[in-house]
Amino acid sequence: MKLGGDRNPKFVRLMELLGVSRPMTVGLLELLWHATAEFAPQGDIGRFDDRGIAKLIGWRGNPGRLVAALVEARWLDPDPTHRLLIHDWPAHAPAYVKKRLERADMPYFYPAADNGRQGGGSCLPTLTKPYQDQALTKTKTSVAKKTATGFPIILDTPAFQRVWADWERHRREIHHALKPTTRQRQLKKLAKVAEASGVQEAVGMIEQSIEQGWQGLFAVKSKGAGDGRIRKGGRGANEMPYAGADQSIALKG
């Protein structure tokens, strides 16, 4: 939060509406922006329902009350297309998010009343088409849309880039280097995992496979869930696909 932001009338209003302390309000807003940067980099946090937003920022009270307060205090803007947008997201977005959007030629989403608005200055990407033409769904934004690095935008983080480099090195070391098609399919599956459970879950899957010396990628196992080793003729007897998947991510190149 910018210096003096906790004295802004909007901040004070949110604090009053929620009945929480100044430090708690700072934390809620910071976590809201962090969650947006990771899961809705174009500002469309309304892709999550009220309960999802509350969970993302650690709010244990009534989710509807939280979102209503954020809207009334103008930290969130209602929108007919995206449900909720972060108010003035370009001013709050971290520098790495701005760079990712610029590289991917993706715009910030503005409320319907500001459809004609375009970014100005180096920190805002220029809209190349009318806003309505670039309204992306959740899947298109983070799974299908890729950045200049070749990663789906939701996976284009320093932590994931590091562990993916380790994964490709690991596959070469076990003499099963990733082929282009397998690489593409694994990234697509990992992006879906990140959508459902966060980027760290995708990172954990890769780290688990490297540590175990596996060729495939599997849902992160809790202790006592079995060794999950890949046996001849198929995946391990105790291997389970990640939640919501139709099949395992044990892709071999």
Image: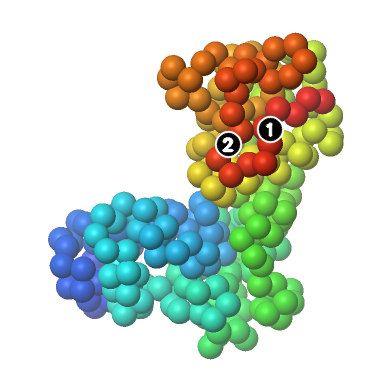
Q: Residues within 10 Å of mark 1 (few under 14, many from 20)?
A: many
Name the residue at 21% across, 68% down: 18
* Amino acid type shown at disc 1: Ile
Query: 117 and 139: which one is in front?
Result: 139
First along the sequence among labels 2 and 1: 2
Q: Is residue 237 above or below residue 152?
A: above
**In the visual, does 226 lie left or right of 58?**
right
Query: Residue 136: x and y, percent?
Result: 66, 67
Query: Residue 148: x and y, percent?
Result: 73, 50
Q: Which quadrant does the C terminus fall into?
A: top right
Mark 2 and mark 1: Cα distance apart in space: 8 Å
Residue 73 is drawn in which quadrant? bottom left
Query: 63 and 226: which one is in front?
Result: 226
Q: Secondary structure at mark 1?
A: loop
Q: Residues within 10 Å of mark 2 (few under 14, many from 20)?
A: many
**In the visual, does 13 lie left or right of 106?**
left
Colour scheme of this structure image? rainbow
Name the residue at 50% across, 25% down: 221
| Residue 37 at least partly seen | yes
Q: In the rendered image, which residue does mark 1 sit on?
A: 249
Query: 46 and 95: which one is in front?
Result: 46
Residue 21 is drawn in which quadrant? bottom left
> Pointer 2 and pointer 1: residues touching (CB < 8 Å)?
yes
